[in-house]
């Protein structure tokens, strides 16, 4: 699967989780405001957003580190995660859609 597709799917999590993320950030803003004795609008939730809202740079750094340490994702699966060939194949079957022929 092309890296760009993986990256795009990763970032789609922000869209699929929007109904979860926005209320949680607002909740954290209100809690912080109550703890500080200020209005919620005065609370900076940038650090919380970095945790809840995915950025392309997060997965790009992971990609770069896997390649730096293991050379390939295949080697990462085997050496880094300790997966057997059978486990890797089972994951492919469960997680990837079959490619249709034209």
Image (cartoon, grey):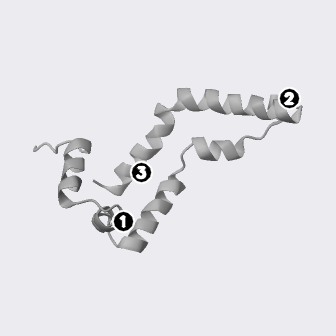
**Mark 1 or 2 closer to N-term?**
2
Task: Decide: few, some or many residues near mark 3? Use Cα within 10 Å; few <14, some 14-19, many ≥20.
Answer: some
* Mark identifier at residue 7: 3
The reply to whether callout 2 and callout 3 are in contact (CB within 8 Å) is no
* Mark identifier at residue 80: 1
Report the residue that reaches farthest toward the right. 37
Q: Which residue is drawn at 38% across and 53% down?
A: 4
Q: Residue at x 42, y 73 (%)?
A: 68
Q: Where is residue 6 in the image (x, y as percent from the top left)?
A: 37, 50
User: Where does label 2 land, which residue?
Assistant: 39
**Mark 2 or 3 closer to N-term?**
3
Q: Where is residue 92 in the image (x, y as percent from the top left)?
A: 22, 49
**Drawn side of residue 88 relative to residue 43, left or right:** left
Q: Is mark 3 on a helix, strand or loop?
A: helix
Quadrant of residue 24 within the rendered picture: top right
Q: Residue at x 80, y 37 (%)?
A: 43
Give the number of the mark in front: 1 or 3: 1
Looking at the picture, does residue 12 appear above or below residue 27? below
The reply to whether callout 1 and callout 2 are in contact (CB within 8 Å) is no
Q: Distance between the residues labelled 2 and 3?
A: 37 Å
Q: Nearer the viewer, residue 4 or 58?
A: 58
Looking at the picture, does residue 23 appear above or below residue 48? above
């Amino acid at each position: 699967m092309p890296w760009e597709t993986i990256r795009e799917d990763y970032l789609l999590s922000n869209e699929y989780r929007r109904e979860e993320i926005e209320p949680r950030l607002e909740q954290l803003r209100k809690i912080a405001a109550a703890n500080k004795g200020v209005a919620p609008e005065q609370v900076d939730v940038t650090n919380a957003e970095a945790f809840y809202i995915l950025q392309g740079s997060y997965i790009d750094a992971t990609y770069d580190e896997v390649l730096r340490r293991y050379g390939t994702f295949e080697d990462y699966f085997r050496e880094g995660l300790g997966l057997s060939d059978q486990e890797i194949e089972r994951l492919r079957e469960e997680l990837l859609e079959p490619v249709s022929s034209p």
